[in-house]
């Protein structure tokens, strides 16, 4: 495939169609290979494409990689820096979308929405009581953009908000006015009535929420994972749910995507969605506009405003 810009994983929309009016754009539904990237100067991916050092080295004309989303665990940013490739990401562009989905999942579990919907459709009229979130504690694992947006909604539900994030200064500007207070990890887990996971996938976060930590939780805890599936030990979570040691869970992200059969599939106190927390019409439009604008600027010899690499201009020059 010979195109200046390769757009992968189904990323598209009116803004990309507009981009294609000025530049040669190729679309691939799969994770692109070196063959797909021959001659390409820009690459757009979601989260399935592994942008490794090897892939970047195999595409010598590549100047910019654009991530349609916030997480960067599928992109070797250090390699991009070393090779003079700019990486841009739509950090914060889907925060509202993720936050709304997070709170919606917690409410669905607390009010037993999914099983009540199924029983009502089956002809039952089961007026089983749910559980209010108001007055409780919302715990956050990470206090990044999506977590802070979630905190705003949780406070609107009259909940207090605590978070674990070892990378933030408790008195720093990022948390000013958010109502979030930082605490040690075990304290956040032990006090939370809802615990939402917004963590990236790193060696440090893998199975951060495991059996010993779940053992510290309240029996009414609802776990919501909208970060990365690796952060939650799904086996330990299933055990805690089956034994009634926590009240429920909602998972938008999984260890493997799509996941294979799991005991979680059959639990009535679990809600499952297919990694869609950040995907709304509005967020996709914001992301597309940001990425396309940055690609246009870089390919025209300018600077990327949304760069996550050390340099916002590529060291590589196109052949």
Image (cartoon, rainbow, N blue to C red):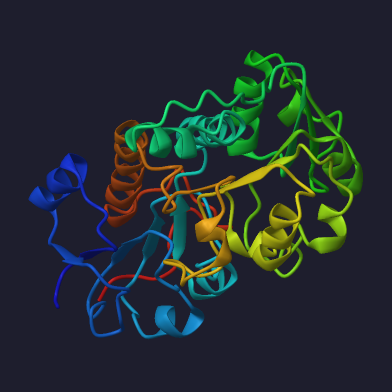
Is residue 209 toward the left or the right of residue 298 in the image? Answer: right
Quadrant position of residue 28: bottom left
> Residue farthest to the left?
21
- Percent position of residue 198, x then y: 63, 46
For residue 224, say whether it is visible: no
**In the picture shown, does residue 225 fall above or below 149?**
below
Q: Residue at x 34, y 47 (%)?
A: 291
- Residue 277 in percent (x, y) is at 46, 43
Task: State left or right for residue 294 relative to residue 203.
Answer: left
**What residue sits 44% from the left and 73% below the top?**
51
Q: Nearer the viewer, residue 269 or 204?
A: 269
Give how far across and how far down residue 301 sits, in percent.
Answer: 32, 54
96 displayed left or right of 188: left
Q: Residue at x 51, y 35 (%)?
A: 95
Q: Residue at x 43, y 26 (%)?
A: 125
Q: 39 above or below 152? A: below
Q: What x and y, as percent, mark residue 82?
A: 56, 74
């Amino acid at each position: 495939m010979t195109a200046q810009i390769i757009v992968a994983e189904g990323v598209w929309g009116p803004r990309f169609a507009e981009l294609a009016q000025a530049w040669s754009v190729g679309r691939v539904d799969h994770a692109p290979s070196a063959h797909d990237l021959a001659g390409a100067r820009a690459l757009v991916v979601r989260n399935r494409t592994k942008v490794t050092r090897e892939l970047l080295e195999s595409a010598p004309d590549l100047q910019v990689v654009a991530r349609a989303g916030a997480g960067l665990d599928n992109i070797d940013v250090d390699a991009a820096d070393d090779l003079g490739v700019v990486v841009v990401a739509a950090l914060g562009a889907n925060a509202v979308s993720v936050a709304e989905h997070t709170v919606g999942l917690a409410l669905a579990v607390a009010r037993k929405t999914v099983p009540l919907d199924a029983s009502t459709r089956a002809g039952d009229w089961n007026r089983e009581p749910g559980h209010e979130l108001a007055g409780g504690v919302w715990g956050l694992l990470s206090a990044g953009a999506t977590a802070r947006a979630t905190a705003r909604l949780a406070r609107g539900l009259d909940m207090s908000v605590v978070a674990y994030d070892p990378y933030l200064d408790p008195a720093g500007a990022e948390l000013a006015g958010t109502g979030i207070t930082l605490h040690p990890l075990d304290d956040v887990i032990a006090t939370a009535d809802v615990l939402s996971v917004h963590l990236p996938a790193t060696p440090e976060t893998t199975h951060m929420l495991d059996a010993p930590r779940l053992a510290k939780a309240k029996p009414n805890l609802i776990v919501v994972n909208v970060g990365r599936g690796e952060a939650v030990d799904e086996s330990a979570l299933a055990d805690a749910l089956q034994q009634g040691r926590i009240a429920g869970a909602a998972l938008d992200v999984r260890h493997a995507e799509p996941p294979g059969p799991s005991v979680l599939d059959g639990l009535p106190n679990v809600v499952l969605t297919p990694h869609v927390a950040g995907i709304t019409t509005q967020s996709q439009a914001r992301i597309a506009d940001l990425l396309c604008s940055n690609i246009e600027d870089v390919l025209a010899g300018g600077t990327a405003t949304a760069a996550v690499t050390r340099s916002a201009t590529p060291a590589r020059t196109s052949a």
